[in-house]
Image (tube, helix red, strand yellow):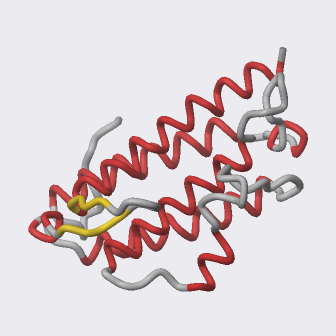
Amino acid sequence: MFDLKGESNMTPVVGMFYSTVKENFERLKSIIQGMSQEELDYHGPNKELNSTGQLIKHLAYIDIKWVYRIKGEPFPDAFENKYGPALDKNNRLPNVKGISLQELLLNYEQVFAMFKSECIGLTDTDLDKVVTFGHENEKQATIRWGMWHMADHSRYHQAHINQLRKWYSS
């Protein structure tokens, strides 16, 4: 049965937002299951789109940045090196050709575990806290919005991955 109920150790609203992120993370894993390295590195019919590998790494990077916003701590340089950067010198997602699906998923699962851990410690009132985000021009949002954005952003790129899979198999 599907529901938007969080873990038993989460407050109700935090749990609801957590479950939207979890549902989309599980959906992403089912979409990419069994993907070959060639398909993971595929850049579309004209070879100019982001590959599934790039999109997975991008999702993990954006999500870990939100984890640290939720924590209220600076983003560690070690994680910037592991998950980032957001964009390369050409203002595009960095290429990840040759990085295995297993490695990309393991890294993303570590991010999700950190997210879950943070959600356990949040109260529904904490969701009102305002944090800063963005690359060039910083914006402000509540933690509640950030958690919604994590789920929405994943679904957005899952549509791209589904399209890449269709093109790759045709």
Is 112 on the left-hand or right-hand side of 8?
right
The quadrant where residue 138 appears: bottom left
Residue 89, position as x, y percentages in the image:
72, 60
Residue 46, position as x, y percentages in the image:
83, 24
Figure quadrant of the N terminus: top left
Foreground of the two, 156 or 87: 87
Figure quadrant of the C terminus: top right
| Residue 140, above or below 50 | below
Residue at 38% in and 60% down: 137
Is 139 on the left-hand or right-hand side of 85?
left
| Residue 144, above or below 165 | below
Is 14 on the left-hand or right-hand side of 46?
left
Residue 160, position as x, y percentages in the image:
61, 31
Residue at 59% in and 61% down: 86
Residue 21, position as x, y percentages in the image:
39, 51
Foreground of the two, 131 or 52: 131
Residue at 78% in and 40% down: 34
* Residue farthest to the top, as pictured: 170
Q: How many marks?
A: 0
Residue at 60% in and 54% down: 58
Foreground of the two, 166 or 23: 166
| Residue 116, above or below 48 | below
